[in-house]
Amino acid sequence: MRKLQMVDLKSQYEKIKTTVDASIQEVLDTNTYINGPKVHEFQKNLENYLGVKHVIPCANGTDALQVAMMGLGLQPGDEVITADFTFAATVEVIALLQLTPVLVDVDLYNMNISLDAIKKAITPKTKAIVPVHLFGRAANMEAIMAIANEHNLYVIEDNAQAIGANCKFSNGTKQKAGTIGHVGATSFFPSKNLGCYGDGGAIFTNDDALAHTIRGIVNHGMYERYHHDVVGVNSRLDSIQAAVLNIKLDLLDEYNTARQDAARKYSAAFDGHANIVAPMICDVCDCHVFHQYTLRITNGKRDELLAHLQSKDIPCAIYYPIPLHSQKAYLDVRYKEEDFPITNQLVQEVISLPMHTELDDDQIAFITSSVLEFFN
C-alpha cells in the first residue's frame, strides 16, 4: 500500500507531469510572468467552466475575499454576517477592512451557516452576508439569497473549498457555487480541489460594473498604467500558477468525481455505526465535492480516535479546533456561548480523514478498518 497522505499532490502531479511541465516551460520561454497570456487563457476557461461573466484572478484566496468586499464599497462599521465555524481568513478580511464581523452559528446537518442565525443577526447596520461552502458542500444559496434580497444585503460567497460544486434550486436548475451571490471568492492553494503549485485566487461576478472596479483594485487601482483611479492592492495571479491551473481545470470534474467516489466508500464502511456521523452524499446532484471528508464522533472520544489513527500513521486533522468567536483576535463582548451551541459541539466532534484524488481502495479499506477497530 502506498504511504498515506492527507493530500497526495505528488501522485497527482506525476499523472500530469508532462503537460504541466510543458505549460510552465512555455511561460519561462516567453518571459511573460505577470498578466501574461496564460493568465488570460485561464480566466476565460474558468469563466466558461463556471458559467459566470467575469473571473478576476488574484494572488490568493484571502485577497479574493478582501478585494470582493472593497469592490462593494463597504464602509468601516458596516456589519457583515458570517459563519463562526470556518477558517479565520473569512473573518480576518472583515476585520482588516474595519468592518464589523458578526459571527453566527452553523447547521448541525451540513455545517454551513444557519439560516435562522442569519435572520436573527440582521440589524439596520447589516450590509452583507458571507456564506462559506464548508468542506466542499454548497450552502443553501437559494434561501440565503432570499434573505439578502428581503433585507437589501450583499452576498459574498466564500467558495475556497467548493469549486465545481453545484447549487440546486427548487425549480430544478443548477448553478455553480461561487457564482450566485453578488460576488464570489476562491482559493487555488495547492491542497484545494483546483490547486496550483503556490498561492493563487480568483473573484467571480456577473456584475459588469463591479468586475471593472475589482480589476482596478487588484492592480494598484490602475486601469491605465500610472493612473490610479481607485485605492487598490497588488494582488495578481502569476503566469506560472495560471499555467498549472489551466491543465488542472480540464480535470476538475474528474478530480471531484474521484473525491465523491472515495467519500461513498468511506461512508459505506461507517453506515449505521452508533458513534459515527458521516457526511451525506447526494445521489441526485453534485452539491458536495469533498474538499474534506469530515466525520462527527458522538461518544466523546474524538481525541482518542485521533491519537489511535496517528499511531497507525494515518494522517487526519481537526478542522476546526477553536471557534472563531473564541479566538483571541476576534473576542467580542457581543458573543455569548449560548449563541453557538452547534459550533461548540462540532469543535469537540469533528475529525477529517485523508481526502484527495489519488485515494485507492486499499488505502480506504485500511483507514476505515482502523477507525472501526478503535470503536470495537
Image: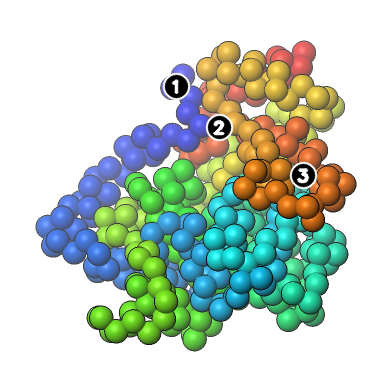
Amino acid of disc 2: Pro
Q: Which residue is mark 2?
A: 354
- SS under mark 3: helix
Residue closest to the eye, 218 or 281: 218
Can I make out residue 307 in this image?
A: yes
Tell which tag, 1 or 3, sits nearer the viewer.
3
Q: Position of residue 98 (x, y in %)?
A: 59, 65
Residue closest to the eye, 262 or 112: 112
Query: Mark 1 packing: few (<14 Cα in 10 Å), some, or many (20+)?
Result: few
Q: What number is the disc on residue 343?
A: 3
Amino acid of disc 3: Thr
Q: Position of residue 339 (x, y in %)?
A: 84, 51
Q: Which residue is mark 1?
A: 3
Residue closest to the eye, 245 or 114: 114
The first of marks 2 and 1 along the sequence is 1
Can I make out residue 141 in this image?
A: no
- Position above or below: 373 against 292: above
Q: Position of residue 202 (x, y in %)?
A: 45, 64
